[in-house]
Structures are given as structure tokens and as C-alpha cells.
Amino acid sequence: MNKVQLIFHHIFRFIWNAIFVISYPILASFGLIFIGLTWLFSQLSSLLTRLRPEGSKVEIKEADWEELPYSNGLLEAKLVKQIMFGPSGFRLRRIDGVPSVLSDFVFGNKIRVIEEGFILEKWNSTESKELPDFDICLYDPDEDSLRSLTNIKCFDWHVSEKVENELSFKWFDGTQGGEVKVAL
């Protein structure tokens, strides 16, 4: 390299190193701020999910007939369909042996307990190709009645609000979402 090229090489190397030394703390700070904000919103989200009026959640595991929590010894469930990387389907029956309308259907593992009864996902099909297609139903154990409230075609739903005799369901299918209000 001749002297002029060597001088330009050292000048550009100095400028490049100066830009890197000046900008690196700024870029690293933005990264730390991004991670911090992500953690903060995650904590805020978990706090808010504890506050929503969804009723008691019930988680059903794979087993033989297993009593449902929060059902006061009334219902039990058994796994009948497990979709790979997807939801599970269960049969429900009454523990007391009384014949019930529940024994005719397959339900999803999302069960919400409210004052009026149990909110259940009643699957309209157990074929993997046809899912998600289910009705959200209200089961009244006193009358042994299963009443369809609405039909939703996605597995990501929750009870967002309960006002007097009206329930609001919010759903999201990965690309779009919505809200459905239903009268009890």
C-alpha cells in the first residue's frame, strides 16, 4: 500500500471504530429497554388475567374417570380424543349415576364454572379436519339441561364479562378476533 492509501485506511478504520464505540452502548441500551418492557408487559398481563371475571377454571388430565374440580362432587370426565398439537376431547357424566344429557356429547377441556352452571365446549365433530367447530353451552345441573349459547370456530376464547343475565365471550383465531354477547 502506498502512503496515501495507508492514510485513508487508518482514517476510515478510526471513523469505523469511533462509530462502533459510540453507537454500541446506544444499541445495547435499546436491547435492554426492549427486554425490560417485554418483561413488564408480561407481568402486567399475568396480573390482569387474574382479575377477569371468568369463573373458576377446570383443567382435566388424561386418566380414567376423574372428578371435575369445582363441581362439588357432581361431574367426572374421561379423555376420549387427543388431537396432536391441539385440544383434547372428553366425555362427561354425573358421579351420582343419574342419566344425563352430557353423556351424548364430546366436550373440550375448557370448562368455566359460574353461578348458573357450567360453561362447556360441546364439539360438533371429533374429526381433526373439521375442528374447531363447537358450541359454547351452559349446563344447568339442577335441571340437567344443556343449552347452546353460541357457536365459535376457534379454540382461543374466554368469558370477558358477566353483567346480570348477559355473558360476553371474546375469541381470537390467530388472524382475527371478536366478541359475542349472549343472554343467559
Image (tube, helix red, strand yellow):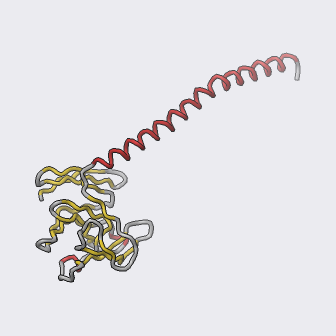
Q: Is residue 152 above or below residue 28?
A: below
Q: Is residue 150 left or right of residue 1?
A: left
* Relative side of 94 to 127, left or right: left
Residue in front for this viewpoint, 89 or 153: 89
**Residue 108 x/y as whole percent:** 31, 68
Residue at 88%, 23% (x, y): give it: 1
Q: Is residue 86 above or below residue 48?
A: below
Determine the residue located farthest toward the front in the rendered image: 72
How far across and down, in percent of the image, does residue 25 sit?
61, 27
Q: Quadrant of the C terminus?
A: bottom left
**Quadrant of the rendered image containing residue 123:** bottom left
Along the viewing direction, whichever of 161 and 174 lies nearer the viewer:
161
In this view of the protein, can residue 61 be seen by the observer? yes
**Is 81 placed left or right of 184 in the picture?**
right
Kindly tell me whether residue 104 is visible in this rendering: no
Q: Where residue 125 sits in the image (x, y, percent)?
A: 29, 73
Residue at image position (17%, 53%) is 181
Q: Is residue 61 above or below residue 180?
A: below
Camera-side residue: 115 or 128? 115
Across and down, in percent, residue 165 comes to 11, 55
Above or below residue 82? Residue 48 is: above
Residue plotted at (21% across, 50% down)? 161
- In the figure, residue 74 lies in which quadrant? bottom left
> How many callouts does the rendering have?
0
